[in-house]
């Protein structure tokens, strides 16, 4: 194992603790080599049976972004019904949940459950490990974006069928995430949902059990 210097170690933790989900972007283009660095970071993620189930669709065309934004807005309105008449209705309607139109690039990350055939080491016991692996790739990309001075926002408000038909994705491939990437002038030091008093970070101590599950 190659040990990190104290400074490098602090850098890793700094990225982990300060990375944020961002929904406001500048139109400034992203240099190709930076975009590629994010994809390399994603592709270096662990995956069950080393199946590497991910693909990355890089979306930069204005008309595709507009169509994606419509799909997301449709889903946001559908979800808003669930908060109607509750004390969260106004907060939900106020929340910005995507920056697809502003961000210069949106990356659709997909997961192919069959990328390594029917029998993938470790996946037969827990089929969701393909999606778990893809999530590892996304987190790598998120941290790399932070390291590159780029902001990233994960958008999951959409019907998979809508995204499949817009991006020509075959029915057996899962569009796992829409990731907006770009520069920003607003990089908060706390989660936006915490700032908007939607949710707060739980006490770590309450998440840790010893030896067995403990009901609170
Ligand atoms: C699987 C997943 C899906 C998410 N989907 C959305 C989304 O659709 N819209 C959004 O605004 N944020 C989305 N987020 C971001 C979370 O709201 C955010 O990570 C959380 O509030 C904590 O904030 P932080 O990432 O800045 O620490 C998603 C995050 C994850 C991990």
Image: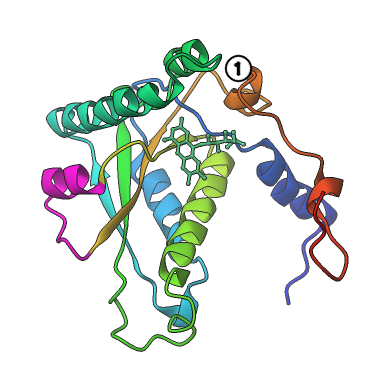
**Is residue 200 visible in this depiction of the protein?**
yes
**Is residue 41 visible in this depiction of the protein?**
no
Q: Residues within 10 Å of mark 1 (few under 14, many from 20)?
A: few
Q: Position of residue 198 (x, y in %)?
A: 60, 23
Q: Position of residue 135 (x, y in %)?
A: 48, 57
Q: Main secondary structure of the magenta part?
A: helix
Query: Left or right: where does residue 171 sit relative to residue 25?
Result: left
Residue holding disc 1: 196
Magenta stretch containing residue 143, yes or no?
Answer: no
Q: Is 176 placed above or below 30 here?
A: below
Query: Left or right: where does residue 123 sit relative to residue 75?
Result: right
Q: Which residues are magenta?
A: 160-172
The image quadrant of residue 98 is: top left
User: Does dot 1 land on a helix, a strand or a loop?
Assistant: loop
Taking the spot 53% from the left edge, 48% from the top edge, the residue there is 144
Q: Position of residue 123 (x, y in %)?
A: 44, 80
Taking the spot 57% from the left edge, 40% from the top edge, the residue there is 146
Q: Look at the numbered disc 1 and say if its residue's Cβ is closer than 8 Å to ligand 1.
A: no
The image quadrant of residue 52 is: bottom left
State which quarter of the image contains the N terminus.
bottom right
- Depth check, front residue: 75 or 56: 75
The image quadrant of residue 187 is: top right
Q: Please say which color scheme the image uses.
A: rainbow
Query: Left or right: where does residue 12 sit relative to residue 120?
Result: right
Q: Is 58 placed above or below 79 here?
A: below
Q: Is 43 placed above or below 11 here?
A: below
Q: Position of residue 3 (x, y in %)?
A: 78, 69
Taking the spot 82% from the left edge, 68% from the top edge, the residue there is 212
């Amino acid at each position: 194992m190659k040990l990190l210097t104290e400074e490098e170690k602090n850098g890793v933790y700094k990225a982990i603790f300060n990375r944020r989900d961002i929904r406001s972007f500048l139109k400034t283009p992203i240099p190709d080599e930076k975009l590629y660095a994010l994809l390399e970071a994603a592709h270096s993620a662990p995956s069950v049976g080393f199946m590497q189930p991910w693909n990355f669709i890089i979306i930069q065309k204005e008309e595709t972004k507009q169509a994606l934004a419509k799909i997301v807005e449709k889903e946001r309105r559908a979800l808003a019904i669930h908060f109607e008449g509750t004390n969260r209705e106004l907060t939900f309607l106020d929340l910005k949940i995507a920056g697809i139109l502003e961000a210069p690039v949106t990356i659709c990350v997909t997961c192919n459950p069959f990328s390594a055939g029917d029998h993938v080491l470790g996946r037969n016991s827990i089929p969701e490990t393909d999606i778990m692996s893809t999530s590892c790739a996304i987190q790598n990309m998120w941290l790399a974006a932070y390291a590159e001075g780029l902001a990233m926002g994960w958008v999951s408000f959409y019907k998979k069928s809508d995204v499949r038909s817009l991006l020509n994705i075959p029915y057996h491939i899962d569009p796992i995430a829409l990731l907006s990437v770009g520069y920003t002038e607003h990089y908060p030091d706390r989660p936006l949902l915490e700032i908007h008093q939607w949710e707060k970070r739980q006490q770590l101590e309450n998440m840790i059990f010893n030896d067995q599950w403990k009901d609170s």
